[in-house]
Image (spheres, rainbow, N blue to C red):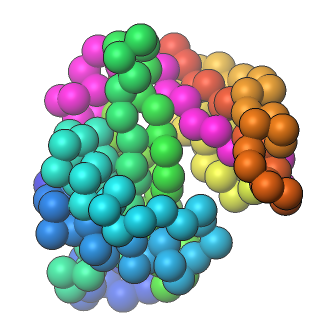
Amino acid sequence: MITTKNNDSPTEDVVLSHPTKEDGAGMWELVMESTLDTNSPYKYILLSEYFQDTCVVAKQNNKVVGFITAFIPPQKPNTVFVWQVGVDASQRGKGIASKMLNYLLESHACKNVNYCEATITPSNRASQSLFQKLARDYDTDFTSAEFFTEDVFPGEGHEEELLFTIGPLNK
């Protein structure tokens, strides 16, 4: 567990930890108030239970104000794939997402991880900036490539997802 001071209010700490299944509902609620792709509450509860070692929550006054859902793909044991990063509007611009990523990468579950991957739409500049910063922080490479094109998504209107790879990580 890591405690970090909130930039606006030094008396209100933000605590980083791996989630418990009880945190899944708070993660889902944060998604419902954001522009992130919505998934069922079950997904967040499930990830918090079975993939808690590769997920992170940020809490302030016991309320989830940020989270990362991630996993290590069985075919790539040296890579952590970050599925979603969510930060409450009240906490944006305070470095919480970067702190959560660093917490994840420095965790025991990621001791053999040398790469971080995420898919990001071309219009999501904030996420692109977050992962570019991660590459700078770890003094490593940052690449992007076509991954999930628009035609693989059902229906209309889902933007393509580019695969961003950061690494090798210099931990």
Q: Position of residue 14 (x, y in %)?
A: 28, 72
Tell me if residue 44 can be seen: yes
**Would you say residue 25 sits in the magenta stretch?**
no
Do we see residue 3 in this rendering? no
Region in magenta: 106-123
Pick the residue in front: 28 or 79.
28
Look at 48% across and 62% down and name the residue there: 39
Q: As displayed, is residue 42 above or below residue 137?
A: below
Residue 16 found in image quarter = bottom left
Q: Is residue 24 left or right of residue 131?
A: left
* Left or right: 44, with 22 as reference point: right
Report the residue at 36% width, 34% height from top. Answer: 71
- With 45 as the anchor, is 68 left or right in this view? right
Q: Quadrant of residue 131?
A: top right
116 versus 160 height, above or below: above
Mark count:
0
Residue 118 covered by magenta stretch = yes
Residue 163 in percent (x, y) is at 68, 30
Q: Residue at x 65, y 52 (%)?
A: 127
